[in-house]
Structure formats: C-alpha cells, structure tokens
Amino acid sequence: MEQWNNVELTNMSKSKSYTLNHEYDDAERLNKENQLTSNGNAIGNGNGETNHNKQQNKVLEPGSEIKPTVHLEDVESLVRRLYGISINEVKELKAYDDRNYLILEDGNIKNPLIVSHCPHGYVLKILNSLDSKKVEFVDGQNQLLLYLAKQNVKCPRPIANAVGKYYSVEQLSGKSHVVRLFEFLPGKMFHEAQMSKNLLFQSGEFLAKLDRSLKNFTHTAYETHKSLWMLQSVPQLRDFIYAVEDQDRRTLCEEIIEAFESKVLSALETLDHQIIHGDYNEQNIVVSLAKNGLDWSVSGVIDFGDTSKSPLVFELGIALAYMMLQAKDLSSGGIFLAGFTSIQTISEQELGYLKYCVAARLAQSLIMSSYTHTLDPTNDYVLVTQAEGWRMIDELWRNNLETIDELWATTGHQYLTQSNK
C-alpha cells in the first residue's frame, strides 16, 4: 500500500564529483547471503518444518513494530554502495509498513552498473522487518515483475545491484531489511484523476488482463506464502479488533468475520486459485491523460507486495471494495465488475461470494489501519479510507446485503447498453 507518484523532491547535491570511484565492500557478503537463500539452506526443528520455512510463513502479530527506521543519509549510502547511483534529488513516498524513496540520479556522474537509465528516476524500497525475513517471497515478487514486463504489462521493473542480485539484506538501526530498486513508473494515481464510469470500467478491464497474464506464472514461494492482508487471514483480525474503539463498529466487524469464515472460507478448496495482485486500489493504479487532455485511461499498476496465490474472486472482491470507496457509491461496483467480467469469467458460485469478500476487505482495511495508527499516530496515510470506509461497510452490510448482487448486475447492464460511455 503505497503511493509512488506526484511528489516533491529534496535536492541532495551538496557537492558533486564527476567520476564514480566506489568499492562495493559488501558485495561478497551480499553474494553469500543471496546464495544461502537461493540454495534453501536452513536448520530443521525436528518436526518436519525448517526455521527458514517458519519465517517464510510468519504473519504480523499484535504489538509488532516492523516499519524501518531510516535516515536520508542511509538512503544516499545504500544507492551508492548497492547500485552505484549518486543522488541528485530524493523524496520519501507514502507507504504502509515499508519505506519508499523516489531517487533522481545525478546525470553528470557515469554509473557503469546501470546500462539503460530510467529517465523518470527510481524507487528505493526498504522492506519492513517482518517481510524482510521472507526472502524467497521477495525473489518471487521480483521474478513476477520481470515476467509481467515480458508480457507488456506496465509495472515497476526491478534493477539488479552491484553483485547482479535483485535484492540484498541490509542492517538499518539494528534490524535486517530487504533493499530493492525499481524503475519509476510515471503518471498520475487513480485517486487523482477525474472519476468517471469509463475509468471504472477500464480499471476492471485492466485488472482482468493483469490476472490473465498472471495465470501461468508460478514460483515455489507462493505455494506457502501467507500474510495478514490475504483474505484467507480474515479470522486473524480478531487479534487486532481491539484497536477499533467504537463498540458498534467492532460488533459489525465481528459479524462480517464470522460470515466470511462460514460462507466463503468453508468453500475455499472449491474456488479457482491463481497468483493475484491482492491490493488493486486507487493508490496503486497508474493513469494517464489522453491526447485530448480530457479523458483518463489506466496505464499501469504498482506495489506487488501483497501478491499471493489466492482465489480469483478474492482479487475481484478486494479491488471492488476500493473502487466503490473511491466512487463513494455502492452501485458503481457494477461498472467495475462489468469491465472485469468482459475479460475474465467468474462463475455464479463465485459471484455469490463476492459481497462477503468486499465486506471482509473493508473490515480488514479498517481494523488494520486502526491498529497500525496506534503504533504510529503520525502516519495518517493508514487512515486514508477510514471515514468513507465505515460509511460504506455499514451501507453494504446493514442495508444492501440482500440486494447488492442485483444492484451490481443492473448497474453494469445499464452501463454496457448506454449509447454514450
């Protein structure tokens, strides 16, 4: 959950040297660490499960503070040592549990490590301490992004570091964090564009095409990967629900968790699974203006940190929740749904589960943002969906649950049959 676009930059060029002469003193250490990970070396616990695998499957526990502690001088040091980049300007970007920085390199300094320079800059991503333990999953994400690039899907492309790896593990403020560099994807974010029915429909189409591209991608890490943001983890929200102060809202969330568990998770094995994006929202969808300067179109997608092997209907439910939040209208979900199903087929059984998936994602977002804010009251980014989210979840669950399927179908049909879209 992060925002990569439209940021102001801080100039870092206090003094300039026009030759790059830097020894990558940690290259050998990084190479050994990455080889250790890729070779799967781990110590067993005697129960058929390695400590390594336990780390890969670990999910967030209450009271854990996992966001990296980073200073700007750390950022400058990391990009010089790992990627040979001398920074001209840098800006921290909004993020949930990670730290992300937009980097513009000093074009006057030759960097032999990067042959094809990205004209729009780079994003340095410093992963939170929990996900940094899941190095196999990090490799899976990198391979997924490289795969999508070959499928002509516009997404951030990973950049190899000094030892030819797409990530390294670095010590920052006494904790280990995975560090990666990506090409910056230019454009506006979905929430900054003028909302329209056509843009909603397009966003549904784009997600369906993305999932179609991911259909045949596989990586062993996704077979065991778990996170609290997967809808499969909704029952674990009970451990964090105390962060919701209002009793009526807690009761509402408890009802949704119970219903999702009994109606959807009980049928989990019958659903069509594949690797999904898992966080297709207004902060992660990149849009561009048409040549006429009026119409917006979806041009790319960022933030693959919540990718997982999950039911396809979970992907749709997650995205649908965020699109309705952005449109501030329950019925608008029918337009997004029409766009998605114009590309991807969803069975009647899965469509019947969809409203529970939407409600579960809304509850998940509201509970976890409340919890995360208790750890860092200065991070208002985590509360971005709170006000509209509580209104939307109440309207869906209390007033429209029995009729929402018909509402979405009717709205979608009306959009598809109108003469002017």
Image (spheres, helix red, strand yellow):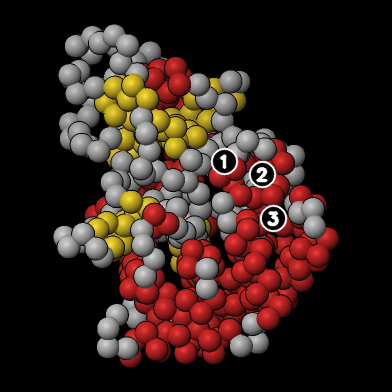
Snapshot quadrant of residue 120: top left
Structural distance between the alpha carbons of marks 2 and 3? 9 Å
Q: Which mark is residue 372?
A: 2
Q: Residues within 10 Å of mark 1 (few under 14, many from 20)?
A: many
Horizontal side, residue 319 vs residue 204: left or right: right
Snapshot quadrant of residue 357: bottom right
Could you tell me if the residues under marks 1 and 2 are in contact, i.e. CB atoms within 8 Å?
yes
Please tell me whether residue 252 is drawn above or below residue 403 in the rendered image: above
Q: Where does label 3 land, which residue?
A: 367
Q: Residues within 10 Å of mark 2 (few under 14, many from 20)?
A: many
**Which residue is depicted at the point 24% across and 63% down?**
294
Q: Amino acid at mark 1?
A: Asp
Instruction: List x then y, in percent, for residue 410.
Output: 47, 90
Residue 161 seen by the camera = no
Q: Amino acid at mark 2?
A: Thr
**Which residue is depicted at the point 66% across and 36% down?**
376
The mark nearer the N terminus, 1 or 3, is: 1
Residue 87 seen by the camera = yes
Snapshot quadrant of residue 403: bottom right
Instruction: List x then y, in percent, for residue 341.
Output: 39, 80
Horizontal side, residue 250 vs residue 149: left or right: right
Q: Secondary structure at mark 2?
A: helix
The mark nearer the N terminus, 1 or 2, is: 1
Q: Secondary structure at mark 1?
A: loop
Q: Where does label 1 land, which residue?
A: 97
**Which residue is depicted at the point 26% across and 65% down?**
295
Instruction: List x then y, in percent, for residue 1.
Output: 50, 49
Horizontal side, residue 145 vs residue 377: left or right: left
Q: Amino acid at mark 3?
A: Ile
**Which residue is depicted at the point 36% across and 58% down?**
193
